[in-house]
Amino acid sequence: MPFDSRAARESAELGNEAADTRASLAAKFAAAQNELGFGAGVGNPYSAAAENKTALVNRQRGIANSAGNQLYAGSTLNKQSAARSDYDRNQKDLEDSFAQAQGAYTGGIGQTGRDEALGDAAIREGAITRAAASEPAPLAVGRGRGGRGRIGAGNTRRPQARTRQTYRGRGRI
């Protein structure tokens, strides 16, 4: 790609926007994980999954406490089964919500990458178009100042003459 300061600026802006979008998507996904209690949010005691589990435990305790001597009666077992069924349904809803959040994150990252690639291609196309429309640089090599036109001029280093100052402290000459 030909050097073009405008293209460099546009490319930097595009990269910054893509990075901001990725960071925003990651923050939303982390918040969903923490809120739902999956992934990085597994240890959150106030997540929806933890509250669902606590509700199940409390409901089962309540059923067992109210059963009295009828702990193994059909009505008690039906209540326990209903409690477990409610827990399973809520857990499935939470897992579906997490899967949607994960899909939104993954899809957003993919879309950002595609948008960045398309934007970069458009920036390169603009730089090439501007370079093709501009006046080409002259090809002739000028002599310039300071004798730089000679081959090797200014790039050589001549050895110093051997003097007492050069070898001071190293013994005799």
Image (cartoon, grey):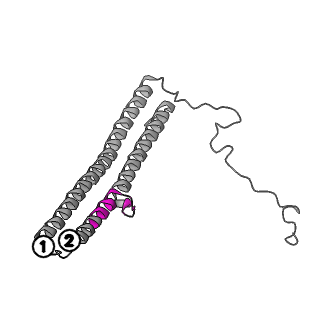
User: Can residue 39 be seen?
Assistant: yes
Q: Residue at (44%, 44%) from the top-left corner?
A: 19
Q: Are marks 1 and 2 in contact (CB under 8 Å)?
A: yes
- Give the side of residue 7 with respect to residue 146, left or right: left
Which one is in front, 53 or 65?
A: 65
Which one is in front, 74 or 40?
A: 74
The residue pinned by badge 1 equals: 73
State the image coordinates of residue 50 (x, y, percent, origin top left): 33, 62
State the image coordinates of residue 132 (x, y, percent, origin top left): 41, 26
Q: From the image, which quarter does the N terminus lie in?
A: top left
Which one is in front, 166 or 23?
A: 23
Instruction: Give the spatial CA distance, label 1 vs label 2.
Output: 8 Å
State the image coordinates of residue 24 (x, y, percent, origin top left): 41, 45
SS under mark 1: loop
Marker disc for residue 158: none
The residue pinned by badge 2 equals: 67
Which one is in front, 40 or 57?
A: 57
Crowd class of label 2 (few under 14; some 14 to 19; many from 20; radius 10 Å):
some
Q: From the image, which quarter does the C terminus lie in?
A: bottom right
Span shown in magenta: 40-57
Crowd class of label 1 (few under 14; some 14 to 19; many from 20; radius 10 Å):
few
Specify the amino acid type for callout 2.
Answer: Ala
Q: Residue at (47%, 36%) from the top-left corner?
A: 13
Q: Residue at (39%, 53%) from the top-left corner?
A: 30
Q: Residue furthest left?
A: 74
Residue 46 drawn in magenta: yes
- Give the side of residue 134 with respect to residue 77, left or right: right
Specify the amino acid type for callout 1.
Answer: Ala
SS under mark 2: helix
Q: Quadrant of residue 122?
A: top left
Q: Main secondary structure of the magenta part?
A: helix
Residue 157 vs 114, above or below: the answer is below
